[in-house]
Amino acid sequence: MTEVLALRNITRRFGPLLANDDITLTLEQGEILALLGENGAGKTTLMNILFGHYAADSGTVEVFGQPLPPGRPRAAIDAGVGMVHQHFTLAGNLSVLDNVMLGTEPLWRPASHRRAGRARLLALADRFGLPVDPDARVGRLSVGERQRVEILKALYRDARILILDEPTAVLARPEAQKLFETLRGMTEAGLSLIFISHKLTEVMAASDRVAVLRAGRLVAERRTADTSAGELAELMVGRRVTRPRRAPQTPGAPVLVAEGVRLEQDGQTRLHDLSLEVRAGEILAIVGVSGNGQSALGALLTGQTAPAAGRLVLGGRDMTGARVRDFTAAGMGRIPEDRHAEGVVGDLPVWENAVLERLRQTRFSRFGFVRRAAARAHARDLIARFDIRGATPETPTRQLSGGNMQKLILGRTLASGPRFILANQPTRGLDEGAIAAVHADLLAARARGAAILLITEELEEAVALADRLRAIVGGRLSRELGAEDADPRTLGLMMAGVWDTRGAPDAA
Amino acid sequence: MRLERRAHVPLVLVATAPLAAIAVALMLAAGLIAAAGVNPLTAYAEMARAAFGSRGGITELLTRATPLMLTGLAAAVAFRARLWNIGAEGQFFLGALTVAWAGHFLLPGVLGGPMGMAALMVMGMVAGAALLAGPAYLRMRFGVDEVVTTLLLNFVAILFVGLMIEGPLRDPLAFGWPQSVPIDPDYRLPRLVERTRLHAGLLVAIAAAAVVWLVLSRTVFGTEARALGHNATAAGFAGVRLTRTILGVACLSGGLAGLAGAIEVMGVTRAVTTTMSPGFGYAGIVVAMLAALHPAGVVAAAIFVAAVFVGADGMSRATGVPSFIADVIVALSLLTMLVALVFTSHRIRR
């Protein structure tokens, strides 16, 4: 085995924060190295230094034995390093081929060599098992397909070392498994890979070697074969973390009932004849592969989109077509799918975000004027009760980490004592410590008697928290499964749309 | 070298950015003044003297600043909510025209004195608000780009004013000048300083700035409008009614621009002509940007822009440098301010 990449004594500070502290790391030919660490451990910073997005304060980067000039992504690309960012850098209005070829041709070339580009793209796609339609508009592709385009973009630029930043953060489990098979195939074709992750299961499943970062320092390197998920968890967090599990509890009366709901968005039917019931003191989990109607279900239950047919009843009141404000006033707590886009207004301070949903209630405003003292006090209370670190009421919300932002959203949702909570992907992108905190808060709400609908792609989460589970496939819900019957095989079948032994779901 | 977003923007930086931007704009304009064959220091000294050196200069400067404060507030309010109102010029004219019509035909004999003045101001605001409400609704309902609609409506509004003052609202005593009928003398705003043009409209503009500040920073409506401007998706998720809020912002913004037109007629021109605004609507955008969209800053920025215009006239008479240099300085300060805003929110790293 030959060494293709070496990071030597990398140190990088951001103000008082030591993001990378004297890190030395190597990558060998044909190897998959997992870079494991919690959010804020310095993984992304390290990879950004390698790729030239940041310059290190000290230390060197060598690719194939040659030192890379610091702070120059172009040099990294030319040396054969490719990076697939967690948030894709694709132009949605262009085709796959355009996106891949963008920036690879000299500006003064009179015409783009599209035919050659297309042939090359298709050859790469075929060779590495990444099927794409070169003419498809990127904006219309699924997240998994977009990721393939990102990878192909790097390969098109002759990348021989590929860095993937949290590649599965946006993928559902089957897609993630498929991705890892593809990555394995790529190493066999001679590529070397680094992927960044904080998910233990996928690190154990997909890597040859693991480097664990904690608080900016490289705390351990292990051969994957010689370690265990338990050991890695401890190394990563520095202590033992256990996710809470639900305690048995008898549910009460139905709180949220949907009957025969049909929901349409952009002229397409996203939910077909959907009926569900969530009772007080229980958690119903909706599992499924992303893009099967979860967003539409979220939009329905948060009052963003009114159903085209059917009824929605919350606590005995018909809420069909009600406004968002009526939902919150009726005791609906909402945790949105995307906390940056929907959950908070990043440029506003924490206190304004803490009360934005309930600004018009007399507690927070009078005669159209905001009761700032009450709102600030409420924010201070949330910060203390939900352990929102690094926040004061005046802090711009954008400065909070993902986990603390989620705690703010959770806090403002739970503080009002809602009788129904919609939790849409509540732990997406969070690290282990934050996940445990979110789970504990949801279980506490359940113990208090709240009805909770949990939409998630994480099966462990669903099984640990939910009393009942249903799968969503193509905008339809499966029959329910009690938590005690939820084994991986049954769940997998359900998520694939096979939920009735006498036949597949009803035809559309 | 790269730009990194600052985690925390120091207040000192926010306060000094416009000053730095203006300084750089003046240095750049100095090149042009030198090219015109005049020592820039002499020219700027003449400008300062013309604008601030006499009672006449200062009152003239404040007279000019009055409509700029209101159009600046109009732009600031709209831009805070990411409603790109480029149509303050048209709203200004429509407000002015409405006041001329009502102040000549409708109100005399019905409402007099202060009540009549207040009614005229409200009517000017309604006219301006109405002109912006349409584009705002089209943007929310059909996604029509309001930059295009508001900009083009400026020409529609000004041509409509032309049509009216050649037609039904023509002043028969103006000896063929294209000028509207004058408002009743009863509605002329009182002078603040005798034998100058400075009128009570200045106080209205300053009061408007205070009201806008209060609305934006202290009310539910203002908070929702700002949230919408920063992140419309999250605002909608939190229950802010987007179309309604944007329409409210449009009425406030258009109303302020209409009020500028109303006050200019009532305080200065008495009648409407198509040349009564040297671009107050467009200059309002510069004023708002120099003020970083803050209402108090708008008052100061309007005084600066007015000083440039008044000063440039005086300088032109004294040194022969064309007074167009005022437009150059104002335009340059918008550009340098945009650059300065990047440097306040970001830092350079190497």
Image (tube, coloured by chain):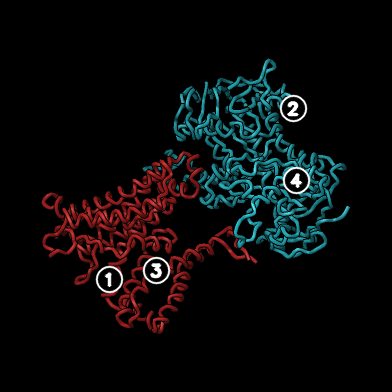
CB atoms at circles 4 and 2 under 8 Å apart? Answer: no
Marks 1 and 3: same chain?
yes
Measuring from the top left, give residue A474's x and y in whole percent: 60, 28
Spatial CA span between label 1 and label 4: 69 Å
Distance between the alpha carbons at the discs numbered 2 and 1: 81 Å
In this view, the mark in front (4 or 2): 2
- Disc 3 + disc 2, Cβ < 8 Å: no
Q: Which residue is mark 1?
A: B60
Q: Which residue is mark 2?
A: A488
Name the residue beneath numbered marker 3.
B330
Q: Which mark is residue A237?
A: 4
Q: Could you tell me how far apart the alpha carbons at marks 3 and 2 are, in whole angstroms? A: 68 Å
Please check whether the numbered discs 4 and 3 fall on a single chain. Answer: no
**Residue in the image at 32% along x and 66% along y:** B65
Chain depicted in cyan: A
Which image quadrant is residue B282 in? bottom left
Left or right relative to A341: residue A169: right
Identity of the amino acid at label 1? Glu
Along the viewing direction, whichever of B7 and A191 lies nearer the viewer: A191
Q: Chain of mark 4?
A: A
Q: Helix, strand or loop at disc 3?
A: helix
